[in-house]
Image (cartoon, rainbow, N blue to C red):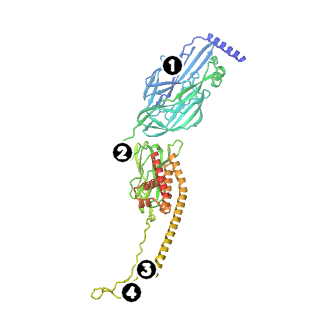
Amino acid sequence: MLKRIGVAVIALACLSVAGWAAAAQPSVTQRLEPTTIGRGEAARLTIAASGTSAPAVTPPMVNGLEFVAIGQSQRVESVNGVTSATTSVTYQVIPRQAGVFTIPSLTPGSQPLVLTVQNGGAAGNANGSVNGRGAGGGQSQAAPARAAPGGSVARLSADGSAFVRLRLSKHELYVGERIPVDIEVGTRDGLVASLDGLPTLNGDAFTLDKLAAQPQRSQEMIDDQPFTVFTWHSALSAIKPGSLSLTMETPLTVRIPMARPDMRMFADEGMDDFFNDPNLQGFFGGATQKQVTVSSSPTVFDVLPLPTADRPADFSGAVGSFTLSSDLSDAKATEGDPVTLHLHVSGSGNFDRVNTRMLHDVDHWKTYAPTATFAPADEIGYRGEKTFDQPVIATQPGEQSLPPVSFSWFDPTTRRYVEAHTQPLRVAVTAAPAADTALARNANPTAGGAPDAGAVGAAPAAAADGLRPDHVDDGHAVASLLPHYYQPAYLVAPSAFLLALLGAGFWSRRRDARAGAARAARARAESLRTEPLIEQMGEAARTGNAELFLRSARLAVQRALATQWQVPPDTLTLEQIEARLGKQTELAQLFEFADEASYSRVKLSPLDFKHWQNWVMGQVSEALS
């Protein structure tokens, strides 16, 4: 109740003071600072108007300049019964082009203000104070609002609750060049309820790296008001040439104060600031919330195209400052075994455009596609090292040499192309062990010797004249003309031979049965060992893991064929398969794909996965059946 009475008494006092006020001549003052800026920067124009009724303040109209209101204050004084009001409005002056601009005076007879905009950076006052107060009625001075390197200025929203600001190192860059950028979003304490999203880039000619979800936080005073500043560190690059501009914007929720009593009778500045504190406005009428979008000042860039003169033939678009080096995973190798060639590109710039084919079509070497990894040296990836790993296989023993690797880039600092080469690398290649490619052969026993002249049926010696007699008496006479195969002595031999033949057949069948049982047992055991590999192939096909799929497929086929061919599985290499079946078979192709997958990335389509899975299952089933 006492508070309501106090408010009523204050209102009556205001009416009384207004009734006693005398008329006073209005006056308008203007202040511009700094008077010289660079293109892409901004200045501050403060217009203060004083009089009995606080005349309205409007910015002048100047071609080539944009005036954006960033702050406003009002003060009421009563001297000897005369009340006067002073209204001060601060504008951000944003030039659209370089030149000399004249800002007309709003008071007749006063000198106009002159603003000089240079193509480069400003001559001075790159960082100005934002906390000072001038003599003109205690209003806020027109000092620059915390200008960043490159002239980014805090452009407050219309209600003075927030700003978005860019801090850049340069405004002239080449297509593809990557430069660091700090994005700052300032929110006035008590007026901004929440940030509703990350800052976004407006401008299709630029790309911005992904912003972190948690920015850095700091405190800053602007026009004697506390602001919480959220900072994101990122990198910006241009994708096309020209004179281009961009802005950043951020959605947020602000508190809008409701209607409150007029407190203009408090001439004391401290009391005026006290009653205008957003944290106390809820006491005088509450506040509502509203979603708004705050934008930064337009930032102008001169984006230059990459020169075509002296461009190296292998230039792939890299822009920055880099160094080149290479090394090997091992200086010694065995013929047919892989070694890895490492190419290191380190420095600063746009590593997304750093690419190279490395080596290809090298005599005595088989090369594979390289893979790349990037290790950043800072939080935005502007500095770091990109490493290319290329598997290579020596195809001939002896002292072999890998030729130099070349890489070229454009250096925006020197404005020239740079072409660098690594040193040749020597590798001592030893011969691979001889592969066991001999196949089993059936031996053909032979018998020989001079005929026994005394043996029955031996050819008689030729006569001296070369004629052989019709019959020679060998001295062995027989008493019977019954054939000897009918005689009892000769019946024992056929019977023994028949029994031996039957025994041999029985033993052979028993041996084959045992061998078949052993093969069936091995096939069942191999089937149990192969079944997990088939399941592993199916899982790899579902996840698209080509390396695991091909490795499992090769191992499954190796085990199945080893059982069928009666050889150890480890001996079934690509060379063995090509020696047995030829190089143009699907089995040899599968082994070659599996070898390549161990050294480099092999991609398989869903149809490839299905084809090879069905083919492997058919081969395994046929070999183990």
Instruction: Give amino acid for label 3.
Output: Tyr
**N-terminal label among 3 and 1:** 1
Q: CA distance from mark 1 to mark 4?
A: 146 Å
Which residue is disc 4 drawn over? 454
**N-terminal label among 1 and 4:** 1
**Tag 1 secondary structure:** loop
Residue found at x 50% / y 68%: 508
Viewer-closest of 459 and 197: 459
Which residue is disc 3 drawn over? 486
Q: Quadrant of the N terminus?
A: top right
Label 4: few (<14), some (14–19) or many (≥20) C-alpha neighbours in 10 Å = few
Q: CA distance from mark 4 to mark 3?
A: 26 Å
Q: x%, y% of residue 353?
A: 44, 43
**N-terminal label among 4 and 3:** 4
Which residue is disc 2 drawn over? 310
Nearest to viewer (mark 4 / mark 2): 4
**N-terminal label among 4 and 2:** 2
Nearest to viewer (mark 3 / mark 2): 3
Q: x%, y% of residue 539?
A: 53, 48
Nearest to viewer (mark 2 / mark 1): 2
Q: CA distance from mark 3 to mark 2?
A: 109 Å
- Residue 12 in the figure: left or right of residue 132: right
Q: x%, y% of residue 561?
A: 48, 59
Residue found at x 44% / y 40%: 177
**N-terminal label among 2 and 1:** 1
Label 1: few (<14), some (14–19) or many (≥20) C-alpha neighbours in 10 Å = few
Instruction: Give amino acid for label 4.
Output: Gly
**N-terminal label among 3 and 2:** 2
Residue found at x 52% / y 49%: 538
Which residue is disc 1 drawn over? 58
**Tag 4 secondary structure:** loop
